[in-house]
Amino acid sequence: MHKADFKEKLASINSKLPKGSSLLIVSKKRTLAEIKAYYDLGHRDFGENRVQDLEEKARALRDECPEIRWHMIGHLQSNKVNQLFSVPNLFAIHSVHDQELLDKLKKAEDRLSGPINIFLQVNTSHEAEKSGFETYTELKSAAESAVTSEKLRLVGLMTMGTIRTEAFEAEARRCFEELNVEKNKLESELNLTLQTSMGMSQDYEFALQEKSNWIRLGTIMFE
């Protein structure tokens, strides 16, 4: 893509975002130059699936892109927590998928120089290959635990639409609607204000209709 293509693509997506919704550009497998091209256009939020890639890119771009905000969006192994917490400009973790991982994050939070936003991942599709909280009881317990942290800020919930389905649109909508139901219950019962992180390149328009606060777009931003 040429510089003009990046500008056109960013403007096109931003024009579709309602108030309260933000774009997270998924930069996995993308070059530093591609990330910087969007940064130079004023975009600040980028997401990576693997801790090692996130750390390498964050360190490489720290000086050139001082205002960049990095989001960890992939499956996070507990043995990678310390490495993740050393990443410059780490802004959020969207994939806190169970209580054990949350406990590891809380135990290591002294390594953080400042607060980090976290999203609890919910498996609304109930597919076996996906991580995430399966029941509202577990989710509520984790939320209650998260709010006692000093440096981990519980800001929202994350989910993904169903992968294996012939009713793609209907299933995506169901998954996103279910996340909103659980978000609303948590907000009411725990007196919280939460965001949602849902919607990827193939289903982000459905997510925006369900008022997603963060859409995570990769392929569509670089094709």
Image: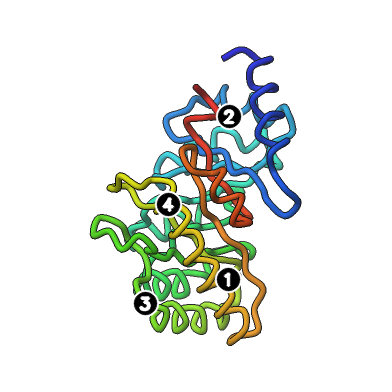
Q: Amino acid at mark 3?
A: Thr
Residue at which label 2 appears = 35
Compared with 13, 131 (above or below) is below
Determine which of the numbered discs, if any, sits on residue 170 in the image. 4
Task: Count numbered badges in the picture.
Answer: 4
On screen, residue 33 versus residue 131, left or right, reads: right
In the structure shown, which secondary structural element does the residue marked by tag 2 occupy?
helix
Q: Quadrant of residue 3?
A: top right
On screen, residue 46 versus residue 167, left or right, reads: right
> Which residue occupies 42% across, 39% down?
53
The mark lying in front, picked from 4 and 1, is: 4
Q: Amino acid at mark 1?
A: Leu
Q: Residues within 10 Å of mark 1 (few under 14, many from 20)?
A: many
Residue at which label 1 appears = 154
Residue at which label 3 appears = 135
Q: Could you tell me how far apart the alpha carbons at marks 1 and 2 are, in whole angstroms?
A: 27 Å
Q: Could you tell me how far apart the alpha carbons at marks 4 and 1 are, in whole angstroms?
A: 29 Å
In the structure shown, which secondary structural element does the residue marked by tag 3 occupy?
loop
Q: Quadrant of residue 103?
A: bottom left
> Which residue occupies 68% across, 29% down?
12
Q: Position of residue 129 (x, y in %)?
A: 25, 55
Which quarter of the figure is the N terminus placed in? Answer: top right
177, 93: nearer the viewer: 177
Q: Could you tell me how far apart the alpha carbons at marks 4 and 2 are, in whole angstroms?
A: 33 Å
> Which residue occupies 51% across, 58% down?
93
In the structure shown, which secondary structural element does the residue marked by tag 4 occupy?
helix
Q: Residues within 10 Å of mark 2 (few under 14, many from 20)?
A: many
**Upstream in sequence: badge 3 or badge 2:** 2
**Upstream in sequence: badge 3 or badge 4:** 3
The mark lying in front, picked from 3 and 4, is: 4
